[in-house]
Image (cartoon, rainbow, N blue to C red):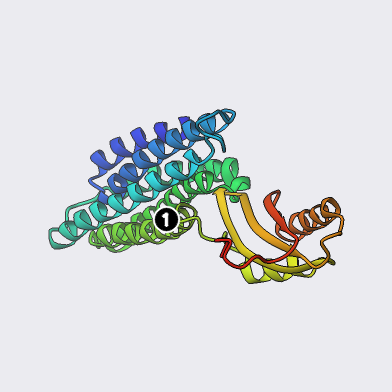
Amino acid sequence: MSLTGTLMVGEVIGGYLSGSLALLADAGHMLTDLLALIVAFAALSLGALPADRRATYGYRRLEILAALINGVALVVLSVSIAYEAIERWLAPQPVDHTIMAAVAAVGLLANLIGLWLLHAHGDNLNMRGAFLHVLGDTLTSVGVIVGALIIALTGWARIDALISLAIAGVIVFTSLILLRDVVNVLLEAAPRGINTEEVRHTIHGVVGVAQVHDLHVWSITSGLPALSAHVVVADPAADFHSLLVDIRQRLRDEYHIDHATLQIEARTQEGCGCC
């Protein structure tokens, strides 16, 4: 947050002095990054609170809401940048390429430090949202530097608008990927990488299991898959406890599912309302 906030102020000043829309666009991106990091930090802090009588799973899904806010903010920002870039293309303005390149170089260094701080948390959607914000800034810093060099060599000021449009495109692409994963969690869809039919076959493959029905796999939050299922046993006299231990161990080993709720049934009962 300190790196991003400081860099944002520097890019606003540099963009104003140089007349570069690309720098100002990146500064706007930095503002959403700063807000995204604040939201991500708050969500992680609140998510660490223990479960209570109302929030029986705890507050970890706040991380998903934070990722949703960040994704929507990125899309809104990209539309704004694209609009300004089109105006700048139609009416190009002079740009001081020296200031533009110097500020972007400092921004690139700061963003690389930010990526290093966040790179190890890609399995968490909230942290991945923050990482994507900083990654987008890193790419835009590179683009601004390239644009400054082109302006210095050719004097073609419209490259500033093109780079701004490219920045908007990168932001949209990364935000849509993030939003897709967020929506999957909110819809309680099966997590990426887990095929429910394969899970069904895995449970059915445990010795003593005759049938599996009412199988559901979802994510409580990113990196925390959960499962519930009804398991019909072939032998009513079987050791149900051992069977449960075997199933849970397979789910843990093959799918990293630690939270599994399993109902053992000795036989199918037609008309029970389960199916």
Q: Is residue 190 left or right of residue 64?
A: right
Residue 26 drawn above or below residue 268: above
Residue 271 location, quadrant: bottom right
Give the crowd class for mark 1: few <14, some 14-19, many >=20 residues within 10 Å.
Answer: many
Q: Which residue is mark 1?
A: 179
Q: Is residue 16 left or right of residue 187?
A: left
The C terminus lies in which quarter of the figure?
A: bottom right
Q: Is residue 22 visible?
A: yes
Residue 119: x %, y % from top left: 59, 47
Residue 211 location, quadrant: bottom right
- In the image, what residue occupies the spot 35% across and 41% down? 32
Residue 172: x %, y % from top left: 36, 59
- In the image, what residue occupies the spot 86% across and 53% down? 242
Q: Nearer the viewer, residue 67 or 204?
A: 204
Residue 162: x %, y % from top left: 28, 62
Q: Is residue 244 left or right of residue 219?
A: right
Type of the residue with mark 1: Leu
Q: Nearer the viewer, residue 267 or 151?
A: 267
Callout 1: SS: helix
Residue 260: x %, y % from top left: 68, 51
Q: Nearer the viewer, residue 257 or 267?
A: 267
